[in-house]
Amino acid sequence: MDRLNTENDSSAGPPQDSSQQPKDPKAENSQKMEEKRSENEKKDKIEDGLLLAIHGAKIKFNAHLGEFKVLNDVPTTQGKLTGTVVEKQIPNFTFYDGFKMISLTAWQDFGTAKVQDNYVLLKKSTLPGIGKMPGNIPPETGKIEFVTSGQINEPESVDAKGAPTPPPPVSVSIGNVIRGNPYVEKNASVVAGMPDSVPLNKTYEVEVTVTGTGSVDLSIINSNADNGNASVTPSTITATTTVIIKGTAKTNPGHGGQLKIEAKVAGVVKATSPGFTVCCHPVNYTDTYAGEVYTSARLGVIVQDGWSSDNGVFADLKEIEIKEVVDYVGKNDSPPFQPRGGSASNSGYLPGDQLTQDTHSISRAGITLGQPGITEANQLCIYKCKCCGANDIVHPNSGFQRIHEVFNSGTATAPQWKHRTKKIGAAVTINGFITGAGNANVVSLEHSLP
């Protein structure tokens, strides 16, 4: 029987290469499905990160889990308030284990869309900050991250249909901390040359006008050891309100007018008041009898000056300086007194926290006997404050009239000429300075003449 020889038969074809063997269709399909699944997961992860973060979203800070709360009245997403970059206050974040934030910076990776002029928060947004657990436990540094967006499903777009109509923008204006002269707690009149200020530990009522709807946070800014400090009550308002400003720490010389009332709405500054100072000014000038001037050359009286601080603490007037202003244009009978020209004279400025004595005397040689008469002079005080910068301000109720009198206590045929000095409170005007009456009713002894 013949054997078929195919060794050189080209029809049999070349030997098969194992690398060119047909692939298993099931394995190839499985690989393609895995690649597609991975691609979809990446896409889903990106899209998930772009979900809007809303009220109730789950958050974490390091190992601490909690919830995000939207505190502003804004349009909703899926029936819940939409988060924006203004939601970065400590009350916005509640942690289940008692962990609390103590400081926060600014949101990162937020969206480009806006709700009521504020950028929206996304699930991928983060907020760096510092927080701690209650008790003697060191603070932790980290960032708040969203574990969930708070949404039930992914919307194709933000649908604000049916959401509350955005309220009109909130505007705020803040009144001045007007002191008056003397200081009053409210409705003070502006005094020329008197900077805005309030006494230490005293209060002043300031009206804060609010238009629109929103919560307005008030605070005192620029407080420090030099500028002083104050408080504002209440610190949160929702409508036009009269708030109470209280001076809590005195301003140092050269740093006046730095304290201000600031108003914020959702973290945005809406208004700032004019600057003011915490300082103390003198009030209630008095003069009481302290002694006689009865020498061979001069006759008169010595008085003890007195005044007080408008915060009730005399030592707090250490940054005040006081000056006496005298006017010699009152009545002057000549004789018995010498003629004089109408003029004013000033003492130098003296420390406001050191009480003084004042001597009012006249020369014996300047008195001509023969008929009675009086000579008058008016007096007031002005002051300056190194803290607020007030300069040449009238000391309230520091007006006095000084009177020298010559009279006959005998008879016409047997005269007994005598002299006495009086100082009484009186409302006076000197060189444009106007003040009410001080408190005094001082009368010297009767001095025999000549």
Image (cartoon, rainbow, N blue to C red):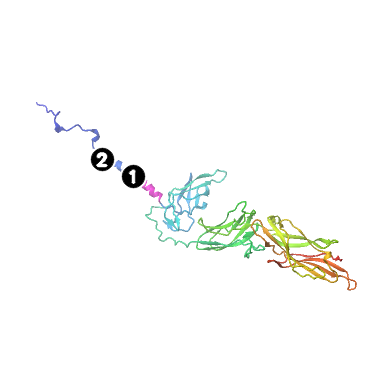
**Taking the image as drawn, is residue 79 in sight?**
no
Q: Which residue is label 2 attached to? A: 25
Q: Is residue 13 magenta?
A: no
Tell me which segment is drawn in magenta: 37-50
Q: Is residue 79 left or right of residue 207?
A: left
Which corner quadrant of the image does residue 272 belong to? Answer: bottom right
Q: Is residue 290 above or below residue 16?
A: below
Q: How many angstroms separate mark 2 from mark 1 (CA)?
A: 18 Å
Which corner quadrant of the image does residue 5 belong to? Answer: top left
**x and y percent of residue 175 in the render?**
58, 62
**As drawn, which residue projects farthest toward the right?**
414
Residues tagged 2 and 1 counted as in contact (Cβ below 8 A): no
Mark seen at residue 232: none
Q: In terms of secondary structure, what is the magenta stretch mainly?
A: helix
* Kind of residue at badge 2: Pro
Return the residue nearer the eye: 24 or 396: 396
Q: Which residue is depicted at the point 39% across and 49% down?
A: 48
Return the residue nearer the eye: 78 or 105: 105
- What kind of element bears circle 1? helix
Q: Is residue 48 magenta?
A: yes
- What kind of element bears circle 2? helix
- Local crowd size for mark 1, using a 10 Å CA cut-off: few (<14), some (14–19), many (≥20): few
**x and y percent of residue 119 in the render?**
44, 54
Mark seen at residue 37: 1
Which corner quadrant of the image does residue 218 belong to? Answer: bottom right
**x and y percent of residue 376 in the render?**
77, 68
